[in-house]
Amino acid sequence: MTAILLIEQILNGLQFGVMLFLMAAGLTLIFGVMGVINLAHGSLFMIGAFAAAGTAAATGSYVLALMASLSAAAIAGVLVETLIIRRLYARDHLDQVLATFALILIFSEGTRFLFGSFPLYLDTPDLLSGPVTLPGGIQYPIYRLFIIAMGLAIAGGLFWFIARTRIGIQIRAGEVDREMIAALGINISRLYTAVFALGAALAGLAGALIGAIQSVEVGMGEPVLILAFVVIVIGGIGSIKGALIGALLVGLTDTLGRVLLPQAFGLIMDASSATTVGASLASMAIYVLMAGVLIFRPSGLFGGTT
Amino acid sequence: MRRENLLNAAILLGFIAVPLWAWVADEPFIITLTTRAAILALAGVGLNVALGLGGLVSLGHAAFFGIGGYAMGVLAFHAQNYLPLIEVPFLIEGTKSMPVIWLVAILASALAAVLIGALSLRTSGVYFIMITLAFGQMLYFFMISWPAYGGEDGLSIYIRNGFPGLNTLDPIQFYAIAFTLLLAALWLVARIQNSAFGLALASARQNPTRVTAVGIRPRHLHLVAFTVSGAITGLSGALFADLNRFVSPTMFSWQTSGEIMVFVIIGGVGRLFGPVLGAATFIAMEYWLDGVSDYWHIYLGAILLGIVLFARGGLIGLIAGREVAHD
């Protein structure tokens, strides 16, 4: 029984981790290539979720909803990059933080203005709803397995894209030396817009995928954004591999911590206070993990030297 | 510099004239609004020590604001319910006395700042921003899931804490307390700025390599600055909680950190009176825009964007000109 529970929780952790990866990959690419810290990445996540929920409500098609989330977030990303972020490349991080904080205010209130304060709901498509029986007799929702598969496929695709394609080579070159690739005749501002749009689309997709599990509401992006920050700090800023490993570590630590810590404290104290202490500590577990990683590797697991 | 001094005097005059006028005109709401501005300005003055003097972009100062708030909340909660705070090894009771609460708030937030700073200052740049943000969130989630002091609902304190010789329930007297503390903090920061430590800190911001070559460790300077910064912000948290007679985990939320940073930047980073002008402007805008539209955050966001993109150096920079030779 506990083994089944444990496997279920590990799958939940993987699903959470994969979702964090979609957010963290965009953040880490944007920072790695352009050196911009983008707090508004959570807003792109929210835009994706709202676009999906709106499209699904209008058309009833889940595939269209996913497409809508990708394109809405990518368009928002392109707009934000060309209108605002572009002016901030040469500025210090403080200005970037403040400008993207202002963007969050604008996006959140704008969404509240368009959709109202009540949460929307996005239904899982019939094909993906209901549980499936895994080997060993574990019942697990198909939709969460779908998210895991989708996330891993995208991770694979992203690795291939960065390692094998021409744009991927340009992105990696851009991380190393911006001036040099501009001197070699690559249109750097178009590359920047493309990277930003790619990151935004991934965040929007994550929002749409999660929108079917949670409610779709204003402010849903920021908690995920902060977890994605933790992920890229652990993984090392600029590293896609670090983002993947960091995301899975954070997802598993958070999910398993919430299940295992109360039980662990149950061995040494009574049930109700064990639940309290365990839950409180579990909510801090990933930050402790982050602090631990930073003590030994101040620039993250796969980061270069700062 | 002369113009900046004039501007600073005008800001102070505004902080004296507006509440006095409101007191005479019997507008307690305006006094409360000014009190709020003074307290948030104090939080900004605290952050400005790290951000402006030290160049440390901390997006986690809500941690100290919240710790100060909960120092007040927990002590007053125990006092109002006649529950001892600790019984073993010796008895500690809660208290309703402001000076004691302030002291506890300052010490607790300074301690937290030492711990968070010691870990976070191992890194720099974007890592530092993200780590301070993460530590703030850690405390936020901890306060939400810790049920002893209200959890997500927070704590209500029925009667404002007392200060010997004053009636703190009278808005103008409570304002006087908050304003005096703001002045004290401004005086302290001005002294720090001109001390040997402050000069070393400024050099460490401008050229850490050279400071290291002279034999000073930038990280030590930064840790001290971060601690002082956290302690001042903690004090403002205790006052803020007393103003509302309520504490909740929202004080720890990252939006709070963002807003404190916004005060500093609207006013002007590194300017002594930057956060004071910034907080006053923010409160005035909040009051005015809230009357204009339900969705006033959109306008606030647009104004902020405008300041970042076009008015570098904040309002003080815009009015008094950019600082010469320092940066």
Image: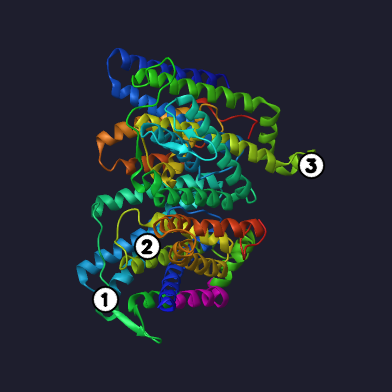
In this figure, which residue is indicated by the disc labeled 2?
A73
Please provide percent x and percent y for residue B278. Answer: 45, 31
Q: Quadrant of residue B289?
A: top left
Q: CA distance from mark 3 to mark 2?
A: 48 Å
Question: Chain ID for label 3?
Answer: B
The kind of residue tagged 2 is Ala
Which residue reaches farthest bottom?
A: A135
The kind of residue tagged 3 is Ala
Closer to the camera, B250 or B267?
A: B250
In this figure, which residue is indicated by the disc labeled 3?
B213
Closer to the camera, B69 or A61?
A: B69
Magenta residues (range): A152-167
Q: In the rendered image, is residue B267 in sight?
A: no
Say left or right for A113 vs B50: left
Image position of A276 with respect to B281: above or below:
below
Query: Circle 2: is it few (<14), some (14-19), or many (20+) Cα within 10 Å?
Result: many
In this figure, which residue is indicated by the disc labeled 1?
A125
Q: Taken as a whole, is the magenta stretch helix, strand or loop?
A: helix
Query: Circle 3: is it few (<14), some (14-19), or many (20+) Cα within 10 Å?
Result: few
Question: Chain ID for label 2?
Answer: A
